[in-house]
Amino acid sequence: MRDLERIRLREERQSRGCDSTECWKSAEWQASVLVFSDGVAALTSDGKFFPARGDAARNSKDWILLDPIRLLISAQAAKDLREESAIEFYGFRQNVVAFSYEGVPVRLILNPGTGLPSGAEITRTALDNVFWGPWGDITTRVSWTFWELERGGVRYPRQWDAESNGRPNWTMTINECARKQNLLLY
């Protein structure tokens, strides 16, 4: 669940491998819940809360910031919103607007044919991340595809693909989506 207005997140996970809470049990599925609120992230496992790893708060906030609906709200409110030159994005000419969100440069890529966002970029350091920290500024680009008309008349992308510094990073496919007041549930 994401609260796009108050920048909060609750994410129920089933994970295995080195991103799970107990890496040494990588073949076994582990259940956990990530909670992010007021700039702090915590994990629960077996009903107990404990601090999430160092970059979890930044990742959670980025996860909300990179939501296409949140980006459109942020762009509309930005005092430094400006149009940039069009770019080629996945083989198509796309419009670009840029702005800052809490000091982070953001570029929003817009499909001129559909009017929907095609993707976004944020650039910043990731000093709290063991892998990305030493590389300085990291540009994360997310693209959104498979837009669906959801209940309540909201269009929302069912697939998100991210790359960092031009390298594939992660892909997410949403099977089910619902909107309840200012919360996005999927």
Image: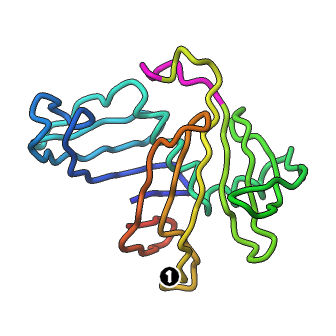
Q: Give the range drawn in magenta.
A: 124-131
- What predominant SS class does the magenta segment belong to? loop
Which is nearer the eye, 112 or 183?
Answer: 112
Is residue 159 shown left or right of residue 88? left
The residue where tag 1 is placed is 150
Is residue 137 shown left or right of residue 50? right
Is residue 152 shown left or right of residue 110? left
* Residue drawn at point x = 48 percent, y = 64 percent: 159
Colour setup of the view: rainbow
Magenta stretch contains residue 126: yes
* Residue drawn at point x = 58 percent, y = 18 percent: 135
Which is nearer the eye, 5 or 176?
Answer: 176
Magenta stretch contains residue 176: no
Instruction: Return the x and y of residue 182 as percentages of the image width and height.
Output: 51, 66
Is residue 98 shown left or right of residue 16? right
* Residue drawn at point x = 70 percent, y = 41 percent: 101
* Residue drawn at point x = 79 percent, y = 45 percent: 99
| Helix, strand or loop under label 1 | loop
Q: In this view, does 115 lie above or below 29?
A: below
